[in-house]
Amino acid sequence: MKIDRIELREIHLPLVAPFETSFGVTTGRRIILVKVFSEGAVGWGECTCGETPLYNHEATDTAWIVLRDFVAPYTLGKDIGSPDQAIALTSPIRGNKMARAAVETAIWDLAAKQQGVPLWQLLGGEQEEIPCGVSLGIQPTDAALLKKIETELAAGYQRIKLKIKPGRDYEMVKAVRREYPDILLTVDANSAYTLDDADTFRKLDEFNLLLVEQPLAYDDIIDHAELQRRIRSSICLDESILGVDDARKALALGACRIINIKLGRVAGHTEAQKIERYCRERGVPVWCGGMLEAGIGRAQNIAMATQSGFTLPGDVSASKRYWTEDIITPEVEVTPHGTIRRPAAPGIGYEVNEARIEALTVRKEVIEER
Ligand code: OSB
Ligand code: MG
């Protein structure tokens, strides 16, 4: 196949509730959508970067430029034998993996649609339904947090993840454990601590956490290995893992025992598959992370998470937790036992609501082969 046209759109979509992490509060999303065209077929991808360069270096405005001026020109008109060859086209670009992944994942959707098969099938996914958890932002009070947890458990979610930051950690987790001694519980620090805080994490060992996500610097594995030696809970790396080589090095050093795979952060499906396989062959659990994606990114995540190494509940949850109305139909729904069933339709398996996208679009640019 050859990609002959790439459309970029920025849409604005308010969140149903603000989402607070150790690096800031998000009240609405500015999301870049990518539509790729080849011989009458189309594919959709979503750029998973945030609005600000605080989770990683990418942000909506910088990703737009990288997509328009580099990812698109490197991709247009090139022969792509199979979708796993797509990512190599943009390999001269350093970093900016979320921008690269937006096009790579769109090409996977397009290839699956051309073959008339669901994307999960093209990826070799085997799980009929994927286990789901929720990621809860930092709440103003413990009482507000407990109320949210009650709601999410009633909806069936299998695992609760709490965002933590200095000053909102030990006592908060203690309050949650007091109410819910047996639930699968995790915490995510988004790099808010240093090795000097090792005692905080040693104290958190008391709460039988399934994992502690990215406690230390976003680009570190050395200090994480030291922290992992000092605590009983398993460290799970998110920000630090940009590809299978990082996974190999982190596991070799003992910097983590579990890995969060995010499609954008690792540059798309092909690299995600390499990490999944590397971990599965070594008995290391992986799970699917989230970046407050709208429906296209969410559908891409669901397809990825059907692969058999994704054994732990991920951060992929129902559309209605984020949006009053999603950009796909049907919206993503969760079963009463906290799973999402894989879709049956070709490609990402959900219909893209182009009329809604058009209404939400604040800028659009078309790049064609010159
Ligand atoms: O670290 O997993 C994270 C959201 C934005 C940036 C980073 C993270 C998150 C989440 C939300 O935890 C996951 C989701 O519900 O999409
Ligand atoms: Mg995280």
Image (cartoon, rainbow, N blue to C red):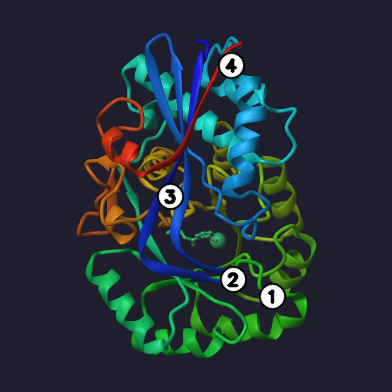
- Circle 2 sits in a helix, a strand or a loop, which is it? loop
Label 1, on which residue? Answer: 193
- Circle 4 sits in a helix, a strand or a loop, which is it? loop
Q: Amino acid at mark 4?
A: Leu
Vertically, is 122 above or below 298? above
The structure residue drawn at horizontal position 29% and vertical position 39%, both measured from the top left corner, is 342
The structure residue drawn at horizontal position 60% and vertical position 46%, both measured from the top left corner, is 61
Viewed as shown, does residue 99 lie left or right of 307? right
Label 4, on which residue? Answer: 76
Q: Earlier in the sequence, mark 3 or mark 2?
A: 2
Q: CA distance from mark 2 to mark 4?
A: 39 Å
Label 2, on which residue? Answer: 189
Q: Amino acid at mark 2?
A: Ala
Vertically, is 351 above or below 316? above
Q: Earlier in the sequence, mark 4 or mark 3?
A: 4
Quarter of the picture containing the C terminus is top right
Task: In this rendered view, identify the residue nearer to me: 281 or 222.
Answer: 222
Label 3, on which residue? Answer: 293
Q: Amino acid at mark 3?
A: Glu
In the rendered image, which quarter is residue 127 located in?
Answer: top left
Mark 3 beta carbon near ligand 1 (under 8 Å): yes
- Residue contact at pointers 1 and 2, CB within 8 angstroms: yes
Question: Is residue 187 something that shows in the picture?
Answer: no
Residue 220 at x, y percent in the picture: 76, 60
Label 3: few (<14), some or many (≥20) within 10 Å?
many
Q: Earlier in the sequence, mark 3 or mark 1?
A: 1
**Between tags 2 and 4, which lies in front?**
4
